[in-house]
Amino acid sequence: MALAAPAETYPGKVFEVIIGTEKTAVFGGENVLPFHKFDGSVPNRPVIAYEIQDVAPEDWPDTVKNVYGDAASDPVKWAIFCQNELKAEAIALRLIGTHPDRQDRSAEDAAKTVRAVLDAIEVPLIILGSNHVEKDSAVLVAAANAASGCNCIIGKAQEANYKTIAAAAMAQNHKLIAMSELDINLSKQLGILITQMGFDKEKLITDPMCSALGYGIEYTYSVMERIRLAALAQNDAVMQPPMLADIGMYAWKVKESQAAEADLPQWGSLKERGIAWEVVTAGALLLAGAELLIMRHPESVSAVQKFIDEL
Amino acid sequence: MALSGVEIFKLLPKTNCKKCGHPTCLAFAMKLAQRQASLDACPDVSEEAKIKLGEASAPPFRPITFGEGAKAVKMGEETVLFRHEKKFVNPCAIVVAVKDTDSEESIKAVVAALLDSEIDRVGQRLRLDGLLISNESGDPAKLAQAVALVAGQGAEIPLIISTTDSSAADAALGKIPGKRPILYGANDSNAEAMAETAKKHKAILGVSAPSLDALSDLTDKIKAMGVEDMVIDTGARTAGEILRNNTFIRRAAIKKSAKSVGYPIISFAQRDDDMLEALVASLCVSKYSSIVVLSSIEKWKSLALFTLRQNIYTDPQVPMQVEQKIYDIGETNADAPLMITTNFSLTFFIVSGEVENSKVPVRLAVMDSEGLSVLTAWAAGKFTASKIAQFIQESGVENQISKKELIIPGYVAILSGAIEEKLPGWKVIVGPREANALPAFLKTKN
Amino acid sequence: MLIIGEKLSIIAKRVREAMLNKDKGPIQEIAAAQWKAGSGMIDANIGPAEDNGEELMQWMVTTIQEAVPLPVCLDTTNFKAVEAGLIVHNNQWGKPLINSTSNDPERFPMLELAVKHNCQIIGLTVGKGGLPADAEERSAIAAEIMGRAMEYGLPLEDLYLDPLVLQIATSQDHALQVIRAVKMFQEMNEPPMKTVVGLSNVSNGCPKHVRPILNKHYFVMLMNAGLTAAIADANEIAEAMKDKPLIDDVLAGRTIDDAARMTETQKTIDVLTGKTLYAHSYLEM
């Protein structure tokens, strides 16, 4: 008996987002579940951005810090390295040095860094704060202004600071990341609040909050799957922006990507283990619906690109 | 069409004899309706009921046990497409491939590594589940020899014998009687002989076909030959094909009750590139394979895949729990504040994340409350003053700290007096209700 | 429909302070207001009450029954507190109700109490660790609780099955599963099993102005499913009964004259049935 191969179609569709000016990157736009090309249209590949920081990555494990060496001492050099040597499609500049517990860099300094990086690269730039809600509202406003006309992504707006950040992103015509804490209903709520300000929902990117393999990834995975189903099956416009998975900072923070093999022989080689942690976290969240990834290790990025080729 | 519990109940003997292991016929009927019990458990069911219930009570994916003894692997029984709907039931088995042309030393090394692969993670024992031995040589004697070698090294490892030659299969299976192996390699041209061999050795039959339609026809044909336990291979090898075919099979079996594909799926993820192999295997684990075959055993790869499998197969209704103990966050000394919370993993991840953000070193006492969040645990009587006091006393933490102060979550502010009563000499401080207020709270506290 | 007035809970600050100070005034005032608004029973929720549970429950039961001629629903996980409350309960106003037993072995002794003191009991359809995923799992647990009740010698008409209402803000899919479970529970016995819900939990965690709207619509939908009893604020139930014809019209797909009410009701029904994803501002979308 021939099998009735049950294809599924949906009334909804994920918004397509284009970032950058000289060189652009495009993601989203599908009207089916992740990589379900057999059901409908998946016009764009997910985009992977390399993460760089405004200050030297002292807290990154050696496995990934060593890749960048001296280039990481300066954000402009670092960005050029990612663009020219690693062929990055996009770069994510995390202004971690602005955090009051790090270097507490000022918003003006952060804006200068943003401008300098933008002047040095052609690929699209994602500008991230330090996730300090008060500081971010000053830093990201200055950064959005400094990046005027560059069609960047600004992030992350959270419930406690979205008003100023969204207003600045809107004024400078940037895209905006809206992050809520691993809760589909709060994610929708934040989307509603931001669009109620007049922000175009088609310029939003949803960050349901990432988590690493072994450290709550099943929550992110299921929230992403549910967001995607709401976007497609329920045609819920607030849930239709593409999703971000901020992989690197979670994957490289956990014990599995840091502990020496000598201490934990059962866990095997540290270098491969760290990369595998970033890779498997990314793979799972791609399948759950992430269209934009931020990652750190070039070998991770290259493995994930090959995986996407096969999908 | 699936029957409801009450409809099934009407067909049962209603004797409440308990012989099925359930307290009443109604309770048994409810389990049957959820496809969590088998009608065979009822000794008194009528023939008429059996016919009516037969198909309706069979799970969409046939339950099959691969291997025998303590390391046997349960497969099938899945009922949903997405893990948020309901728990994925039987975790994907991870199997490593060897060839009968490999040297004896190299096969022995793989078996040893496999036996040594077990690790403990969040209270679960995780390991590589089995070995696939392929008849690369084409020589039946070599295959039998390799199977005997493996069986001699690790008799309890579940085995997949991969060959399309039924006489080679017969010889190899003869070396491992009663072990419930999988004979992989039945196809349209050898189905009859392979089915006979599988039946003779009580092996599970691995069936492959180049398309879903062809596979569906082939399983029907083999079932008619009297082989019920099959694992299926659609010929998918790229990630995209695996996702497509596995998705179609899962949909067809669950939504359309298509019995001809209601079998556990075997997928092959072998790649030259280890990272890519890990990714393709991740896809198989997340998206519906019951067995994934790998090319090699690296501990780092196993660790990542074990962890993903454990995460994906966690019951979304049962909160994941972390171990009850006192966690040091940052470089704690005797002056570090002591906080308490419940052992719901998400509570723990969020609270410990915020404490890390604060950069204030903290001792975080995580108390076993069956994985409930703070307020729910309190209401259920699992996070009460006397239980908190007992935990703090038994932990011995008071010998490590300079001030006997305990910070409790704002949601259970009501407990502060009662805890102080039960912990003489201690001061209880009420912390914030939400974790995101912790950095500000901890900094002003210092 | 039996309304079990829910306002006397230790979670409410005013009630907690009254319990702490043994101040009868607020307790009796609330109980009387619930009685006047139509409650047929009063819920006394004293929390886990580890320390003074027995004395507190006795004080609550007598304080309530001094003010209103109604039975009391004894709401605590503390077994001894329940028994103490049952001893002083005045049964001339009706049988008391124990809240609750479940499939958690720690809660089995509550069933013994119900038999020993000839009272009614709520069977909460949860097991130990983890929540039921859908109506079918709730029914399977209900069947086990019913089996245990028979074994202990409790008449099934004294058992109220509670499908466990969860917060729509975090567990939206369960809203519909609970409605389905209420229907299934009734089919599980002849005469039908009694059912009860803790209504207001559906809107727990939602913005203040949205809560009564969700409660009201959910109550009507549960009532239509055949619900026997609800632990709820009797004032809200009176509101719900007033609006029921209108809500029923929208549920039946009819258009009603008041466009604003129509929109509010339709959106709320869509959220409760899982057709649209819940967000705190769902009424504004």
Image (cartoon, rainbow, N blue to C red):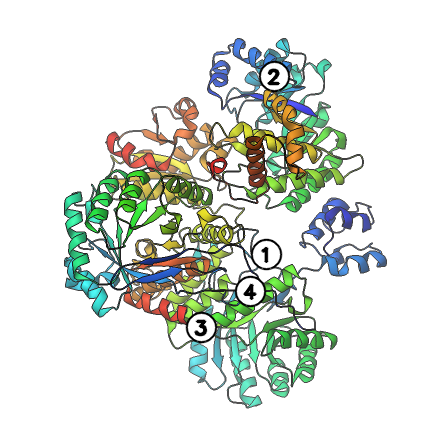
Kindly check if marks 4 and 2 are in contact, taking CB atoms under 8 A apart as contact: no
Image mark 3: chain? B
Residue at numbered disc 2: C34
Residue C140 in picture, x, y percent from top left: 68, 45
Query: Mark 4 — residue?
Result: B247
Picture residue at 65% right of the left edge, 39% below the top? C179
Q: Cα distance, mark 4 to mark 3?
A: 35 Å
**Kind of residue sitting beneath label 4:** Thr
Mark with earlier residue (1, 3): 1
Q: What is the CA distance from the residue labelled 2 to the residue labelled 3?
A: 71 Å
Labels 2 and 1 touching (C-beta < 8 A): no
| Mark 4 or 3: the one toward you | 4
Residue at (60, 42) in percent of width and height: C273
- Both marks 4 and 2 on one chain: no
Kindly check if marks 4 and 3 are in contact, taking CB atoms under 8 A apart as contact. Answer: no
In the shown orientation, is residue B178 left or right of residue A311? right
Q: Is residue B290 visible?
A: no
Tags 4 and 1 touching, CB below 8 Å: no
Q: Nearer the viewer, mark 4 or mark 1?
A: 4
Return the chain for callout 4. B
Between disc 1 and disc 3, the foreground one is: 1
Q: Residue at x 67, y 34 (%)?
A: C249
> Label 4's element?
helix
Q: Nearer the viewer, residue C97 or A35?
A: A35
Q: Position of residue C11 (x, y in %)?
A: 49, 24
Q: Secondary structure at mark 1?
A: loop
Q: Alpha-carbon distance for marks 4 and 2?
A: 54 Å
Q: Nearer the viewer, residue C85 or A80?
A: A80
- Labels 2 and 1 positioned on one and the same chain: no
- Is residue C111 visible to the viewer in this orientation of the structure? yes
